[in-house]
Image (spheres, grey):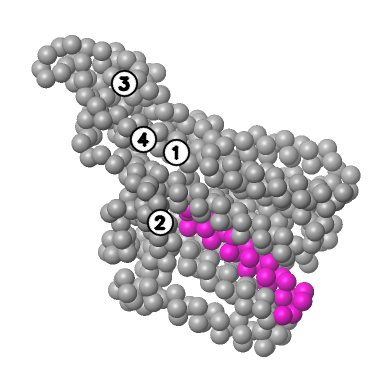
Amino acid sequence: MFKQASQKSVLLFFFVYILTCFANPGFMGTDEYWTGITRYVPAQEKNLHNILQADDVKSPTQLMPLLGLSHLALGLGLEAPYEQYRFVQIFIGLFSALLMAFCLLRFLPQEKHTFVFLSFTFYFASAFALTRPMYESMSAPWILMSALSLKEYLKTPQLKWIGTSVAAISIAFLLRPQTGICAFAIIGFLTWKKDWKALLVASFLGFLFFILAGFPDLYLRSGFHSSLKNILLYNVKFGTLYSQQPWFFYIPLVFFMMWGPFWISKKTRHLIKSTWDDHKIYWVYIILLVGLHSFFPQKWERFVIPVLGLMILIMADWLKYEWNQGSKKRVWLLATLNGLFWVPSTFFPAQKNLIDLSRYLDSHTEIKEILRYKKSPQWITEVFISRTDWKWTEIESLPTEPLKCDSRLVMNLTDYKNLVPKLDLEMTFETNLIEKIAYKLNPEKNLRRTPLVLLKDSRCVNFGFNL
């Protein structure tokens, strides 16, 4: 009976993750677009020598897998940039899901499978965040593998698990250099155990992988590991140019991401104490990564995604504890609250307004000019527009004369409702529920998260004649 329950949870995990990959084309934020998507599509124009810019802090090893997949999409006949992006996104998402499932099934005892797979399936940020072709997301399964392999070695000392842990953290480093800090967890635990043989093996393998990781920079950049040097210097010199947060920003963030208030009760001390031995490796990885990012002034929520899988593992055990202790109502309460966020974040695409407007312009070749009212939207996913016979025209006030027939006016929905321009509504490009809430709470910082409207003029002028 228990085995059947765990099998059903695994099948449910794959169903939700596969559905998310295919149904949700959204991306998480601006960085994923500007330093990710625009670098590997359209594949017809991208190669190893032009995906990096002179002042770039991205490593070639971060972009090479994405570039390779976009060229594979092109080789399969997908010529439209959006189709290439979707191919990369779906491939990465499915691969990540398979890798995470392999790790969970291989390293965790069967009695944990049900709660763990249900947690990975229904945690509100998991299916979306862990299936994106974003550097933080792509490194997350490898961090999970590294931590679980290290834990397996400490339980059954076989050097192959140390090799697996080091190899996994090295791959995570290639995809997101900041995750390399987690290698100190391996060194720390082996030193604490006084396992000098394993420490020597881990150090040798880690050094070897680090040397190999520097060769792409020698070929494509200015020198050995020049990207790593650039990102360290960039964070020190220019971090203050971004939105700054206090050093303790990640403490409340992780607390609330892990539904911290829910676990506070008379049993909290016993809960943490009874699970500490099983969780200490996870916590060390989390603290190392969060601690590193706390040193820099710019702090974004997505920086914790590499250790999201470890956070879910901890919550899964805590949920099982509460369930076994008879607190089933509390578990259902958390499940209900989490579900309110899970549905929109999983199945309603982020940045949908920007993507849909771009795709609409790409397919409606009769539109040659877009009048952008007060630079809203600030940007759209222009890389998905394969044609070049159109242009932006910036305007600060509503037009008083009829628009040309090949022109459209775009503005955000708030301005549209306040100003009520005398134009016909052609299309509305919606945002998801979470983006609507974000815009309501902080409109100034979330202007791109408002719906967009595309307007046309029934009195339009064509070739100088009123129609």
Q: Which mark is residue 351?
A: 1
Residue 151 part of the magenta segment: yes
Residue 287 locus on image (x, y percent): 62, 63
Q: Name the residue under label 4.
A: 359
- Which of the two residues, 46 or 295, is positioned nearer the viewer here? 46
Residues marked 1 and 4 touching at CB (< 8 Å)? no
Mark sitting earlier along the chain (1/4) = 1
Q: Give the range drawn in magenta.
A: 133-158
From this view, report whether residue 223 is shown above or below residue 57.
below
Depth-wise, is mark 1 or mark 2 nearer the camera?
Answer: 2
Amino acid bearing label 3:
Leu
Left or right of 198 on screen, residue 346: left
Proximity of marks 4 and 3: CB atoms separated by less than 8 Å: no
Comes first in the chain, label 1 or label 3: 1
Q: Look at the numbered disc 1 and give the secondary structure of its residue.
A: loop
Of the numbered discs 4 and 2, the one sitting upstream in the chain is 2
Quickly name the residue at label 2: 72
- Residue 385 in the image: state x and y as whole percent: 31, 40
View extreme (front): residue:
76
Task: Tell me the quarter of the picture where residue 270 sits.
Answer: bottom right
Label 4 or label 2, whichever lies nearer to me, is 2
**Prevailing secondary structure class for the magenta stretch in the rendered image:** helix
Of the two numbered discs 4 and 3 on the same chain, state the one appearing first in sequence.
Answer: 4
Three-letter code, disc 4: Arg
Q: Distance between the residues labelled 3 and 2?
A: 38 Å
Q: What element carries label 3?
A: strand
> Between marks 4 and 3, how big is the CA–CA gap?
16 Å
Identify the mark at residue 319; answer none if there is no mark: none
Can residue 300 be seen here? The reply is no
Q: Which amino acid does label 2 sit on?
A: Leu
The residue beneath circle 3 is 455
Foreground of the two, 88 or 466 = 88
